[in-house]
Image (tube, grey):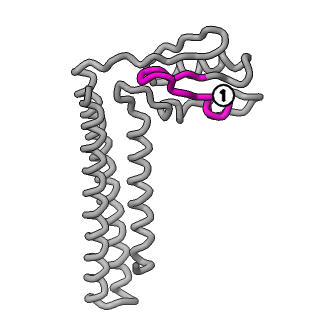
Amino acid sequence: MDTRIQQYDDKMKKTYEHLEAEYATIRAGRANPHVLDKLRVSYYGTPTPIQQVGNVTVPEARIIQIAPWEKSLLKEIEKAILTSDIGINPTNDGNVIRLVFPELTEDRRKELVKDVKKKGEEGKVAVRNIRRDGNDAFKKLAKTEISEDEIKQLEEQLQKLTDKYIKDIDVLIEAKSKEIMTV
């Protein structure tokens, strides 16, 4: 691949991976430990991911269990979950914290699918913006370094890349929407 195209491929790939990570944090009625990914607790004064201060397990389909390595962290973890946007109240039995995910209502599922589609659209817009930036950069090169034909080739390669990532994002949206709507 042309090095001038490679940088735009990298940017589009990052956009796609960011969207994948976003989707991983959307809960679909099943317990998914990734909903805790963004949460941090103060561990000896340092904001630390919950996964690094305890054992996070999924003993049942709709329960996440967090067993901190130090009992003193129970309150910290509980506070982090309560102040987050997860929307689930933790239960603390003095040893572990459990998060019980309720069954999603039909309305809530539809709302989540709308959110998935909106995030997907934002991802597609980001990919198209990268394409626009690339085309602008190629046009600037036209004035000095390369011929019109080379610019056409670069623009075509960039368009193919854009189409590929847009298609990948559509597949991602479809898969996540299906996962959410599956009862």
Residue at the spot 47% in from the left edge and 20% down from the top edge: 63
> Could you tell me residue 154's position as x and y percent?
31, 79
22 left or right of 178?
right
Residue at the spot 39% in from the left edge and 47% down from the top edge: 19
Magenta region, residue range: 48-66
The residue nearer to you, when weighing 156 against 49, is: 49
Which quadrant: the N terminus?
bottom left
Dominant secondary structure of the magenta stretch?
strand
94 left or right of 162?
right
Where residue 161 sits, quadrant-wise, is bottom left
> Could you tell me residue 36's position as x and y percent?
52, 30
Q: Pick out the residue farthest to the front.
A: 59
Which quadrant: the C terminus?
top left
Residue at the spot 27% in from the left edge and 88% down from the top edge: 148
Residue 66, placed above or below residue 178: above
Where residue 151 sits, quadrant-wise, is bottom left
Asked if the stretch drawn in magenta spans residue 160, the answer is no
Give the number of callouts.
1
> Could you tell me residue 5's position as x and y percent?
39, 74
Secondary element type, mark 1? strand
Asked if the stretch drawn in magenta spans residue 52, the answer is yes
Where residue 2 sits, quadrant-wise, is bottom left
The residue nearer to you, when weighing 114 against 104, is: 104
Residue 183, placed above or below residue 171: above
Residue at the spot 45% in from the left edge and 31% down from the top edge: 32
Residue 86, placed above or below residue 158: above
Residue 73, placed above or below residue 150: above
| Label 1: how many Cα within 10 Å (few below 14, some 14–19, many 20+) | some
Label 1 is placed on what type of residue? Gly
Q: Pick out the residue farthest to the right.
A: 44
Can you identify the residue that label 1 sits on? 54
